[in-house]
Amino acid sequence: MKAVFMGLGYIGLPTAAVAASKGIKVVGVDVNPVVVETINHGKIHIIEPDLDKVVKSVVDKGYLKASLNPEEADAFFIVVPTPFKQNHRADISYVESATRAVIPYLREGNLFVIESTSPVLTTEKMADIIFKERPELKDKIYIAYCPERVLPGNVLYELENNDRVIGGINPESSDKAIEFYSIFVKGNLHKTNARTAEMCKLTENSSRDAQIAFANELSMICDKAAIDVWELIELANKHPRVKILQPGCGVGGHCIAVDPWFIVSEYPEQAQIIKRARETNDYKADWCANRVVETCLEYANKTGKEPVVACMGLAFKPDIDDLRESPAKYITSRVISEARAEIMVVEPNISTHKSFNLTTYKEACEKADIIVWLVKHKEFLTIPKLAGKIELDFCGVRKYCI
């Protein structure tokens, strides 16, 4: 068995490595020469626990190699980004480009799977492109959609143990894809059609977005009412049928912050709650930035000097290096632009950033007058109460500190 994975990012590389660890010969394709060279040296370009060990092992054994170009194989997987455009419509140009790149290498009996989060009908659109370019392959290859369901920081475990939803353009394609995934997935493989599988991924993340929006809206109400939102949620969750999530400074990442818009843009009249939840979570980041700017002004009026502000965290969730769609990054940028203050930026999971001058969390906590907790990184949970400092806690660091 030989497989080509188009895209070696946060999902593509771990999936390719896990498949290779089960004895599948894998060619990982990426447009970035540095990524290709890094992987071929048995190293990785992202932060994910234990991924470096798996990649080194499969590269050393010859089961995984990276390349700038695809080649003939038994199975092809599209694992590239699907961002949204300015109008919040999905940009499937990366999916289409990757699809077109593998068309010359497809042959009868091949499996073609899209894992990239995509709007409904994307798989069928890619099938049409393939058959238009290679009409002789009509009904001769298997085409399916199988969205990833992993949590950054726990990707390797979840790739193998989570259930997967697999939908083909026909039942035979679903069966062929299930046959492949059964090689390395221990979870249940649920068979459906491509449209349902596409909508399933969007539904899962839209549901999460709505639940987070409730918590974020509640946090803003509690701030206005002078109520400790963390205590409130803890008490409300004592009800046997209530499970409120924890609020934060917004929602980031390439899934929950993006996927709901794919439904809203295609079904604007029907997706009222989904749209409102997305807007609430986007607004929460602006609300946090406004609170920081206001606090800086209050400090300056009270003391007669501009404060030193420490923005603690840039990643979109704790203990990772992924800054995609990060509300913490957005808030930090706004504070730098709008606050009359000296700004210190802390992100313990990256060493450098092209837009921010980073400092250590210890130095920031020592020098800053105002501490802004944006991401609940494990390092921050060890910091004791800071006497004489103003602390704005948007993510519950002080509630859950050790």
Image (spheres, grey):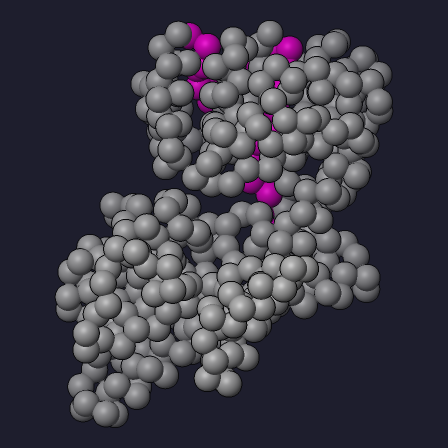
Residue 72 magenta? yes
* Quadrant hosting residue 178: top right
Residue 369 as seen in the image, left or right of residue 267: left
- Residue at (57%, 28%) from the top-left corner? 161
Which one is in front, 222 or 275? 222
Q: Quadrant of the N terminus?
A: top right
Q: What main secondary structure does the magenta stretch of the protein show?
A: loop
Residue 307 position within the rendered picture, expressed as x and y whole percent measured from the top left: 21, 79
Q: Is residue 239 magenta?
A: no
Quadrant housing the C terminus: bottom left
Q: Nearer the viewer, residue 155 or 325?
A: 155
Front-most of residues 108 and 267? 267
Which residues, given as a range, are shown in magenta?
Answer: 62-85
Q: Which residue corresponds to the image point at 76% horizontal and 61% vertical from the top-left?
A: 271
Between 218 and 87, the one nearer to me in the picture: 218
User: What residue lies at 68% left-to-right and 60% top-to-bottom?
Assistant: 241
Answer left or right for 232 relative to 37.
right
**Is residue 114 shown to the viewer in this render?**
no
Residue 233: % across, % down: 53, 67
Query: What percent of the width, then of the height, locates residue 130?
Result: 74, 24
Q: Position of 390 compared to 36: left or right?
A: left
Residue 176 percent across, percent down from the top left: 74, 16
Is residue 389 at all visible to an observer of this figure? yes
